[in-house]
Image (cartoon, rainbow, N blue to C red):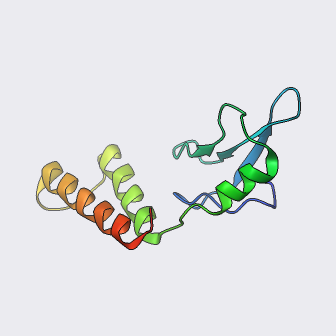
């Protein structure tokens, strides 16, 4: 079940959901996409308002999503680009560096 207070995952764009600790005091957020694995407060150390605020203010850069998708394709063996894996790693590092410089990460 998707929690309406949560924005989509900043890495893959999928829905996310809240999980509550057994004592009901703390929460965590998990991306619904099993291949992504993004989460905040996985060990249930955050209160709900703090957690939702942290999840919702994470960057949602299209460039980062594009890089993550290319990484998935590379891992699946479907990534096609001249230069092989060495070129892929160099391009990936350059794109992440540029996103950091822009403040997207």
Determine the residue located farthest toward the right in the rendered image: 24
Residue sitting at x 46%, y 71%: 62
How many marks on residues?
A: 0
Image quadrant of residue 65?
bottom left
Q: Where residue 94 sits in the image (x, y, percent)?
A: 23, 63
Horizontal side of 68 relative to 53 (left or right) equals: left
Pick the front one: 19 or 15: 19
Answer whether residue 56 is visible to the viewer in this image.
yes
Above or below for 45 versus 18: above
Which residue is at a point 72% across and 33% down the rendered structure image?
A: 44
Q: Is residue 52 above or below residue 35?
A: below
- Residue at image x 35%, y 45%? 76
Is 93 in front, or is 78? 93
In what quadrant of the picture does the C terminus appear? bottom left
Q: Position of residue 70 (x, y in %)?
A: 34, 58
Coordinates of residue 93 in the picture (x, y in percent): 25, 57
The answer to which quarter of the image holds residue 66 is bottom left
User: What's the residue at 63%, 63% (across, down)?
Assistant: 57
Q: In the image, is 85 to the left or to the right of 97?
A: left
Above or below residue 76? Residue 67 is below
Q: Position of residue 100 (x, y in %)?
A: 37, 64
Res. 1 in view: no
Give the left or right position of residue 10, taking residue 15 as reference: left
Farthest top residue? 22
């Amino acid at each position: 079940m998707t929690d309406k207070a949560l924005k989509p995952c900043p890495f893959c764009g999928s829905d996310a959901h809240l999980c509550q600790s057994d004592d009901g005091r703390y929460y965590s957020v998990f991306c619904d996409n099993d291949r992504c694995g993004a989460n905040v407060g996985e060990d249930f150390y955050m209160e709900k308002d703090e957690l939702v605020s942290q999840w919702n203010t994470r960057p949602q850069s299209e460039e980062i999503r594009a890089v993550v998708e290319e990484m998935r394709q590379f891992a699946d063996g479907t990534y096609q680009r001249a230069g092989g894996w060495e070129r892929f790693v160099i391009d990936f590092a350059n794109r992440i560096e540029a996103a950091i410089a822009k403040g997207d990460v």
